[in-house]
């Protein structure tokens, strides 16, 4: 009996504990990301932001949650009720399950699979289904147009993100996210990866429908976009899914380009700070870029958005993959050589 408990029950309990240790901080971080965004935008616009509910407004996220829970969920008469309700749930769940392969510290990951990059890319690509389902099931022309916009936008920038991932994989020789963090390469490789870092962050803005690429939710022409018919907790799930996807993209950026849980620039003297703290700080840095872009940049026109994705990012990333492969081969720096 003891062997049965040790063999089957203990591993399941350990996995459940690891899931809770990742999901609970994620949910708390997502709640306070909404607070941080309001405060940062308020500072940029010389106003106060949340300051009434709790000390310095720190309880504002909980007040918002209570308000949304207390509202009535309204489903349009002509809507497909099952798909209408499933769409926000799918969006929110996908933003959580992607964290199964993201290492927050050395050895601390729920599933340390060898194809973690492919898993992440597959999960992020599936996010478009929730938005398409919401636009179609709402039985509204405005919502449907917003869903189509989101699909075209996300597909367009996923192509560039895929090529950016190829350049990272060329320098590490592995699809395992932990090995990507710990892989060593010459200093000039980091310089060559910097343009890919910039393109990845911009593509992440488009992938998460954030400003200045928030065209699927254009109030001026689509009255709110794909989620215009949603209210109460169904709207909240879309809202939370967007912020969870922001944290996910920031985590991916940290793993691929910023060294994950390692100290910045390989400074050994900073090694006394725990790895999860470094990982969280790097994620916060990328999230600040997300918020900074929203507070400073005007919204793109849709033709500008498509031109940037297909006529600028796609040819540039294709050329950079060839350049990176050539440079690594010329300097005998390809992994395994």
Image: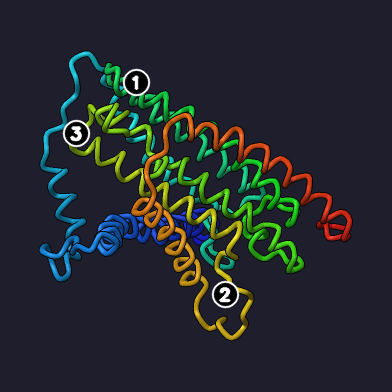
Residue ID for mark 1: 144
- x then y, percent, for residue 194: 63, 58
Q: Is residue 144 above or below residue 172?
A: above
Viewport quadrant of the C terminus = bottom right
Whichever of callouts 1 and 2 sits on the residue coming sooner in the sequence is 1
Whichever of callouts 3 and 1 sits on the residue coming sooner in the sequence is 1
Q: Is residue 199 above or below residue 159?
A: below
Residue ID for mark 3: 231
Give me the C-alpha separation between circle 1 and circle 2.
Answer: 45 Å
Q: Is residue 122 above or below residue 149?
A: below
Residue ID for mark 2: 263
Of discs 3 and 1, which sits in the foreground?
Answer: 1
- x then y, percent, for residue 211: 38, 45
> Does residue 117 appear to the left or right of 292 in the view shown?
right
Is residue 244 visible in the rendered image? The answer is yes
Give me the C-alpha separation between circle 3 and circle 2.
Answer: 43 Å
Of discs 1 and 2, which sits in the foreground?
Answer: 1
What residue occupies the far top of the structure in this picture?
A: 78
Q: Residue at x 42, y 30 (%)?
A: 150
């Amino acid at each position: 009996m003891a062997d049965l408990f040790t063999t089957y029950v203990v591993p399941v309990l350990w996995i459940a504990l690891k899931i809770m240790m990742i999901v609970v901080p994620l949910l708390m971080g997502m709640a306070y990301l909404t607070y941080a965004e309001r405060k940062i935008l308020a500072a940029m616009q010389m106003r106060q932001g949340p300051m009434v509910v709790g000390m310095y407004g720190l309880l504002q996220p909980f007040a918002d949650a209570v308000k949304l829970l207390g509202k009535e969920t309204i489903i349009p008469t002509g809507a497909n009720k099952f798909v209408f309700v499933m769409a926000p749930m799918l969006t929110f769940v996908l933003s959580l399950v992607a964290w199964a392969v993201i290492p927050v510290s050395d050895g601390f990951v729920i599933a340390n699979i060898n194809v973690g990059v492919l898993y992440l890319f597959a999960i992020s690509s599936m996010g478009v289904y929730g938005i398409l389902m919401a636009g179609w099931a709402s039985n509204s022309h405005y919502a449907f147009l917003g869903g189509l916009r989101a699909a075209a936008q996300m597909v367009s920038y996923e192509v560039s993100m895929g090529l950016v991932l190829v350049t990272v994989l060329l320098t590490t020789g592995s699809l395992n996210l932990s090995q990507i963090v710990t892989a060593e390469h010459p200093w000039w490789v980091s310089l060559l990866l910097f343009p890919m870092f910039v393109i990845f962050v911009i593509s992440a803005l488009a992938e998460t429908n954030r400003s200045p690429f928030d065209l699927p939710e254009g109030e001026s022409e689509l009255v709110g976009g794909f989620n215009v018919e949603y209210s109460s907790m169904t709207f909240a799930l879309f809202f939370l899914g967007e912020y969870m996807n922001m944290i996910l993209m920031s985590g991916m950026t940290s793993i691929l380009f910023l060294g994950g849980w390692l100290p910045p620039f390989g400074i050994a003297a900073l090694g006394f700070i725990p790895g999860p703290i470094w990982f969280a700080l790097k994620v916060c840095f990328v999230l600040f870029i997300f918020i900074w872009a929203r507070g400073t940049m005007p919204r793109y026109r849709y033709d500008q958005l498509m031109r940037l994705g297909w006529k600028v990012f796609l040819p540039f990333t294709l050329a950079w993959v060839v350049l990176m492969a050539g440079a690594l081969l010329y300097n005998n720096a390809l992994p395994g050589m």
